[in-house]
Amino acid sequence: MTEKQLLIADLKPEDLKIRLLGESRFESPLSPLSADFPHEAYQGRFIRPGGGIFFEPSNIHVDEKDHTYATNLIAELAGARQKIFFDPRNVKAAIVTCGGLCPGINDVIRGLVMTLHYRYGVKEILGIPYGYQGLDEKYGHPIRKLTPESVSSIHYFGGSILYSSRGSQDPEVMVETLQKNNINMLFTIGGDGTQRGALALASIAERKNYPISIVGIPKTIDNDILFIDQSFGFETAFSEAVKAISCAHTEAHSYRNGVGIVKLMGRDSGFIACHAALAMNEANFVLIPEVPFSLNGKNGFLKALFERLAARKHAVIVVAEGAGQDLMKSTGEFDPSGNKKLSDIGHYLSEAIKDHARRQDIETSVKYIDPSYMIRGIPATPSDSLFCLILAENAVHAAMSGRTSMVIAKRHGYYVHLPMELITRERRKVNPRGYLWSSVLAATGQPPNLSED
């Protein structure tokens, strides 16, 4: 089911409602006068009560069969509020990073600390080490204090200064740790699993009448968070992946019947593969999880590949890590987060191509490049770094206003609040009938059908 179909079939106005901890009684310390703030981002332009945007543009093209399309779905705008729930003098905030690495994590941490400290005057900001493990005392990870000085230059580096971990922890224990440390604001930087965990924390806190604002900043290098235009770090990742495709093209072009294979991240969604291939525009085949393919048969991948080699003497293949898993034996293993460990589609394709060439007595040179971890452990590009800062600022504004169980997202060019429950329903995927995949087919020239039938 595509995002659009899910929207039409399932969503109701209440699905976009943002939970509030209570009435906002305090005046925001952000001045309404721009003269008081040297930075243009803070001109006292508070979001009015009820301010929002259409969840989908009202003039979006729909087919006749989509006559049930809803236009009463409103996403709440992100931004500063004139009245806030928390007295900044009594705020004790915490930040946690979970799951896999992604460019820009340190930028988000820095943005949160700077906004809390300089814009709202919050003096107690804590860093939770090693993901959700840091909220369980049995692991012995000491919680650290964060200050503007301690985070001043962290955006020059990849990774997370707070470290990370995978795997779920007992939410009851984590809430106890939050209460014990008098934390009333938690920022969760992570993917859909992290935000599901955050939602569980918020539910337990509500049951205990524990007023804590839990706000997420979605993180996924695969760009697979539902209903979000783009996640931070994605642009940096596919920009770096372009370098690997360039190398693969050079290798392939330098040999008779040269083949360059580049495997990129994309467990369930092929966004990095698609964007990197389009940005470089040297790929001849792009294989993604959303579009099944066969190796053999009259329409199979190998037939199309060797026809390309016969005509042009070289080929570049970009493949997402989750593609073609049905062609290989399952590993039967799972990581600590419960994700199935994938078989290596890059190695599989490399061996299959070599074997086919040997059987056909065709000379070939196959080079396999896997830059997966190289594209996620690097600093963010300036564009991504700016994106991270805006997400962080809006996360602080949301938490200060007493909003909880929600994430900051960019949708249709606007920064909005979305409920955690909504964005964790399933993963966003490339639409095989959509514009992105059509662009890939046009750029590569690959057959639209690479299946055996």
Image (cartoon, rainbow, N blue to C red):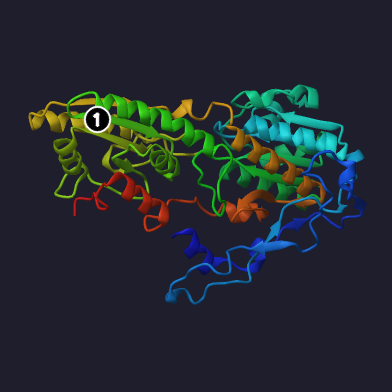
Frontmost residue, 13 versus 140: 13
| Left or right of 86 in this view: 275 | left
- Quadrant in the rendering for residue 309: top left
Image quarter of the C terminus:
bottom left
Dot 1 alpha-carbon crowd within 10 angstroms: few under 14, some 14 to 19, many 20 or more: many
| Residue under the image location 39 percent in, 28 percent down | 244
Residue ID for mark 1: 259
Counting from the top left corner in percent of width and height, residue 415 is at 67, 51
The vertical placement of 15 against 26, above or below, is: below
- Quadrant in the rendering for residue 133: top right
Is residue 162 in view?
no
Counting from the top left corner in percent of width and height, residue 345 is at 32, 35
Counting from the top left corner in percent of width and height, residue 65 is at 43, 75
Image quarter of the N terminus:
bottom left
Frontmost residue, 363 versus 398: 363
The vertical placement of 447 against 263, above or below, is: below
Q: Residue furthest front?
A: 35
The vertical placement of 88 against 143, above or below, is: below
| Left or right of 394 in this view: 285 | left
SS type, badge 1: strand
| Residue under the image location 84 percent in, 35 percent down | 118
Frontmost residue, 389 versus 175: 389
Is residue 195 in view?
yes
Q: Amino acid at mark 1?
A: Val
| Residue under the image location 92 percent in, 51 percent down | 26
Please count the marks in the image.
Answer: 1
